[in-house]
Structures are given as C-alpha cells and as structure tokens.
Image (tube, rainbow, N blue to C red):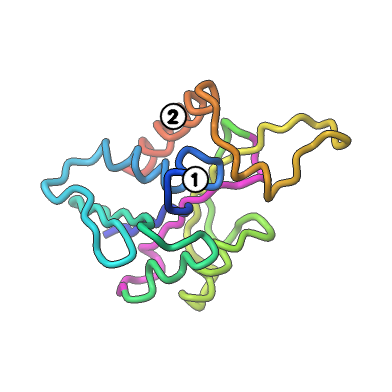
Amino acid sequence: MKVILGLGNPGVEYANTRHNAGIIFVDYLSKKLNSPYGWRREKNKMIFKADKFILIKTVDTFMNESGNLISNLQFPISDFTLAHDDLDIKLGEYKIQTGVGPKLHNGIESVERTLGDTNFERIRIGVDNRTLNTEHRIPGDEYVLQKFSAEEREILNNIFEEICNKLI
C-alpha cells in the first residue's frame, strides 16, 4: 500500500497557493481512484483510502509541523511518498526522486525528522513561474504563499495527469 502525504497549509487563505501544491495533487489523485471510503477526518488529518493508496492531507496542521500528520502511522519507508511544492523546479515540470528535495523547505524537514530518514520517494512539483529578472524577483517565502492563476492551474493539472499515469 502506497502512502502519499500531500504537503500544504490549512485554511481558506492558503487554498490554491503554490505552497499547497502537494495537497492540490492528492486531491487530484483522489478523483482518479475508486474508493467507497472517500476523504475522512482522523484527528489532525484527512485520509483517503483506496485499493493501493492511502492519501493524507492536513486539517489544521501547518506546513512546518507536517511530520505530525504521519507520526502515528505504521508503514515501511519504501511505501512512503511525499508530494510537495518545489521552487527549484519551473512550473510545468516535476521530478519523482528518492532522497532528493529542495533546500530550506520546513515541511520536508519536519517529515524527515519524524521518519528519522531522508531516503523516501518525493514528488517534486515545480511551482517557480517568476521572471529571471533578479532585481524584481519575489522572495521565495512570499512567492509560495501566492495563489495560482487559472492558467497556472491548467499547467498543474497537465503535470498531475502525467504523475497519476505513472503512479496508478
């Protein structure tokens, strides 16, 4: 059974932001899977169970404490995948890698601390759509909290479809 945690922040003010790309992805994937269970709240998280997948997203835990979402779950590290935003990758691109991720991502660091391991699969979802003009470039910590435009969401949906085809 593959366990996929989609990183993001809770609340309507963070919905559709770049930092919530992981949550947006697990929502997208859940629509591709058949499940009589559907999304259900279990303490501080929402869980979606399907034949070969358990999807997890936050209810009220913020990105920097994401490890808490998996702290009481039992699974082999080889079955775990973390889906997250990545400013090191351009919007419209993604990477599925093991043990590799962006620098300075507090959500990933929280998960690594909880697992006591860094050797798990990551779905690195590119969110960088800033201009290369460094003079007017928005700092990363501000940029990831901005909402996706309709055009950017269309680009995301296209790569989500590719990722789903690889996973299912």
- 149 sits left or right of 23 in the view: right
Q: Closer to the N terminus: mark 1 or mark 2?
A: 1
Where 131 sits versus 73, above or below?
A: above
Q: Would residue 85 be counted in the magenta stretch?
A: yes
In this picture, which residue range is highlighted in magenta? 73-90
Residue 52 or residue 21, whichever sits in front: 21
Q: Secondary structure at mark 2?
A: helix
Q: Quadrant of the C terminus?
A: top left
Question: What percent of the width, then of the height, locates residue 60?
Answer: 39, 60
The residues bearing labels 1 and 2 have C-alpha atoms spaced at a distance of: 18 Å
At 47% across and 58% down in the image, what residue appears?
121
Q: Amino acid at mark 2?
A: Asn
The residue pinned by badge 1 equals: 14
User: Which of the 4 image quarters holds residue 42?
Assistant: bottom left
At 23% across and 41% down in the image, what residue appears?
33
Q: Quadrant of the N terminus?
A: bottom left
Q: Tag 1: Cα neighbours inside 10 Å, few (<14), some, or many (≥20)?
A: some
Question: What percent of the width, then of the height, locates residue 17?
Answer: 53, 40
Look at discs 1 and 2 and give the one toward the viewer.
Answer: 1
